[in-house]
Image (cartoon, coloured by chain):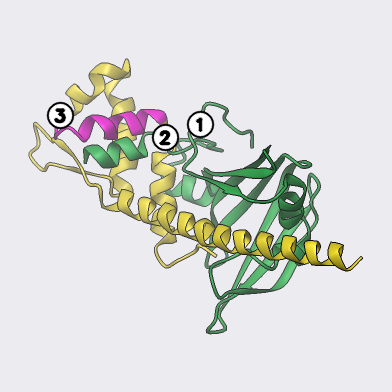
Amino acid sequence: MVENASARPDMTIVRVFDAPRRLVWQAWTEAERLAQWFGPKGFTNPVCEVDARPGGMLRVTMESPDGSLYPMEAVFDEVVAPERLVWTTSVEHDGNVSFDIRQVTTFVERDGKTEVTTQAFVLRSTPEAAEALGGMEQGWSQSLDKLGDVLAGG
Amino acid sequence: MVSNAASDRLSTTLAALADPTRRAILARLASGETSVTELAKPFRMTLPAVSKHLKVLERAGLIARGRSAQWRPCKLDAGPMRDVAEWVQNYRRFWDTSFDRLDDYLIDVQAKEKNRGRKR
């Protein structure tokens, strides 16, 4: 799947961290560091494996305070230390892949602080879903641009 | 982490939305119901081609068609799109709270590095 350069992200979050980029990059790419912050408040990560190189896997199992487990897997598409990290993850339901999300994260250092921008692109639906829809298209890699406009208009 | 009971319907909605023509049709319908002929005008497409797109949107529950045989007006149904918006919102919340924790972690780890430096 090729990232559509003109595609608008479906989610963008920008945050400035009061830490040098080297440290922020390590927090994203070293398992024992990632495990300490990834996931909602109160969650732990009993499984956290990070193989940060193109084609490498990210495997995290989050555990909520009530003991529910939320496994997540992603494949690294791009790893450009210490400035750019791209992975693709599949959102599943009942063991069937429903759609993919490409997560693009960039790290920019300014005056000893680090600006992190993370963007999510919804990439495609499953072939099964495509078939259900009449097989009109295959291998979509379109983002949901204009969704916001439609929602605003509706 | 983000799967939920509604994600099957969600994937159908996302698939239907993953086409620029269909998004344009929805954008047009956001300003009111209209006929297929009217919808087809800006797209330089045959009526059957537009009808195909409308069927996909209808199956995804994004539009409703009127029942009268001659003039079956198309109407936007924003319900499934709210599912998508809700999913995106949950995903955003996930990252927001993770970033709060990352902030805490980075403050913590730098304080520890400083302490270690002092002890040396």
Circle 1: element type: loop
| Mark 1–mark 2 CB contact (< 8 Å) | yes
In magenta, the rendered stretch is: B20-35
> Which disc number belongs to residue B35?
3
Q: CA distance from mark 2 to mark 3?
A: 25 Å
Chain bearing mark 3: B
Judge from the rendering whether residue B108 lies leftward or rightward of residue B78; answer left or right: right
Q: Nearer the viewer, mark 2 or mark 3?
A: 2
Which residue, given by chain and number where applicable, does mark 2 sit on?
A145
Disc 2 marks which amino acid? Answer: Asp
Taken as a whole, is the magenta stretch helix, strand or loop?
helix
Chain bearing mark 1: A
Which residue, given by chain and number where applicable, does mark 1 sit on?
A7
Residue B118 in the image, given as x and y percentages of width and height: 85, 64
Residue A99 in the image, given as x and y percentages of width and height: 53, 51
Q: Can residue A124 be seen in this snapshot?
A: yes
| Residue displayed at 63% across by 75% down | A44
Circle 2: element type: loop
Residue A13 in the image, given as x and y percentages of width and height: 51, 46
Chain A tint in image: green
> Which sits in the foreground, B23 or B86?
B86
